[in-house]
Image (cartoon, helix red, strand yellow):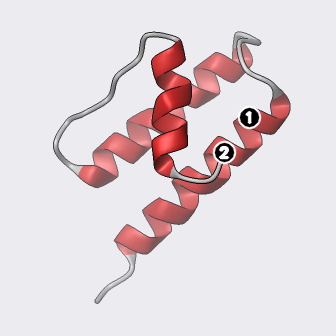
Amino acid sequence: MNSIYDVRQLLKRFGTIIYIGDRLADLELMEEEIKELYQAKCITTKEYQMAILLLRQEMAELKQPE
C-alpha cells in the first residue's frame, strides 16, 4: 500500500466508497472505516498500520498553512 488510492481500493473491497467532496473530511471518514474494519478483524495489522499512516500523512499535509 503506497498511496491514498490504495487505501480507497482496500475500502472498495468491502463495498465502501467514500466521497464527500471535502478532501479532509474524506480522509477522516476513511480513517474511521479502516478502524472499524480492523476491529472487526477484516484486515490485517499491517494493512491497518499502513492505511492509517498514509491517511494521517495526507491529513497533516492538508492542515499545514501555505
Residue 48, x across and y down, in percent: 72, 35
Residue 34 falls in image quadrant: top right
Q: From the viewer's perspective, is 6 left or right of 17? A: right
Which three-letter amino acid code belongs to the residue tagged 1?
Glu
Question: What residue is at 74 percent from the left and 34 percent from the top?
Answer: 47
- Evaluate if marks 1 and 2 touch, with contact meaning CB atoms under 8 Å apart: yes
Q: Residues within 10 Å of mark 2 (few under 14, many from 20)?
A: few
Residue 59, x across and y down, in percent: 45, 61
Check disc 1 and report the residue beneath it: 47
Residue 53, x across and y down, in percent: 66, 54
Check disc 2 and report the residue beneath it: 1
Question: Quadrant of the image for the C terminus?
Answer: bottom left
Residue 45 vs 52, above or below: the answer is above
Residue 30 vs 24, above or below: the answer is above
The answer to whether residue 33 is visible is no
| Mark 1 secondary-structure assignment | helix
Q: From the viewer's perspective, is 30 left or right of 18? A: right
Q: Nearer the viewer, residue 51 or 3?
A: 3
Q: Earlier in the sequence, mark 1 or mark 2?
A: 2
Q: Nearer the viewer, mark 1 or mark 2?
A: 2
Question: What residue is at 63 percent from the left and 18 percent from the top?
Answer: 37
| Mark 2 secondary-structure assignment | loop
